[in-house]
Amino acid sequence: MPKEAIIHRQIIDHLRSLGAWVFKVHGSPYQTVGVPDLLVGYRGRFYGMEVKQPGKKLSPVQAKVIEDIRASGAIAGRVESVEEAVALLDEYVPE
């Protein structure tokens, strides 16, 4: 199973190759708990992506933050591969 850091790098590199703006959130004691790992701007939309190794689950706090982001009308989700990250983008890209 690939390390989560490797999955992050693969997703970041691929999304940037598509022209997306990507920011990797590095946790700190001063940060709000549960903020998704990647903040992504792409084609007029803003996404939060929580990156997990295959089979790993979201923590309750991460799940709640993603739920809150979605409730606000923004886009967020759990991804474990480049393909899932692109699927999240494609699901919401305006025509």
Image (tube, rainbow, N blue to C red):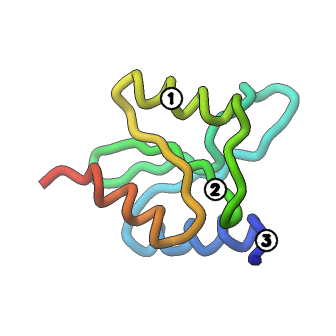
Q: Earlier in the sequence, mark 2 or mark 3?
A: 3
Q: Label 3 belongs to which residue? A: 3
Discs 3, 1 touching: Cβ within 8 Å:
no
Residue at mark 2 to residue at mark 3: CA–CA distance = 11 Å
* Residue at the spot 56% in from the left edge and 69% down from the top edge: 81
Q: Could you say whether the residue bearing mark 3 is in a helix, strand or loop?
A: loop
Task: Specify the label residue 67 is tagged with.
Answer: 1
Q: Position of residue 16 (x, y in %)?
A: 47, 68
* Residue at the spot 82% in from the left edge and 26% down from the top edge: 30
Q: Amino acid at mark 1?
A: Glu
Q: Earlier in the sequence, mark 3 or mark 1?
A: 3
Q: In the shown orientation, is residue 9 left or right of residue 33? A: left
Q: Position of residue 10 (x, y in %)?
A: 60, 74
Q: Label 2 belongs to which residue? A: 51
Residue at mark 1 to residue at mark 2: CA–CA distance = 16 Å
Q: In the shown orientation, is residue 51 left or right of residue 72? A: right
Q: Residues within 10 Å of mark 3 (few under 14, many from 20)?
A: few
